[in-house]
Image: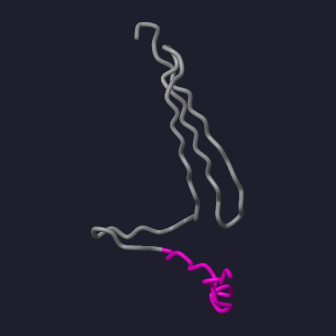
Amino acid sequence: MYQSLQSQESEKMEQPAPSASFLFQGVNYELHSTESVRRNVSPGSTEKLGGVVTETILDLETSQKSSVCLVILLSADA
C-alpha cells in the first residue's frame, strides 16, 4: 500500500520567511516585496511578428496578480 513520506510534524511546519536584507559583494540589499515572476517568450508566427513576451507577477504577501504583454514587431524592411 501507499505510505505518505510526510510526518504529521512536517505538515505543521510553516514556510521560511525571507530575510529582510542581504549583503552581496559588499553591497547591502533590502527586500521591499516578495513576488513570484513567470516569463514566457513565444517566437513570432509571421514575417512581421518578431515574438510575444508575457510576464505574470504574483505578490506572495497579498496574492495580487498582474500581467504584462509585449508584442515585438519587425520593420517592413526585415
Q: Which residues are magenta?
A: 1-20
Instruction: Give the quarter of the figure containing the C terminus.
Output: top left
Q: Is residue 5 in the magenta section?
A: yes
Q: Which image quadrant: the N terminus?
A: bottom right
Write down the quadrant of residue 8 in the picture: bottom right
Q: Is residue 38 left or right of residue 24?
A: right
| Residue shown at 52% from the left, 19% from the top | 49
Residue 55 inside the magenta-drawn segment: no
Q: Residue at x 46, y 8 (%)?
A: 76
Taking the spot 64% from the left edge, 56% from the top edge, the residue there is 58
Above/below status of 78 relative to 28: above
User: Residue 68: percent from the left, percent from the top?
Assistant: 61, 40
| Residue that lies at the very extreme toward the front in this rendered image | 1
Q: What is the x, y in percent for residue 30? A: 47, 69
Q: In the shown orientation, is residue 10 left or right of residue 41?
A: right
Which residue is painted at 63% across and 85% down in the image?
6
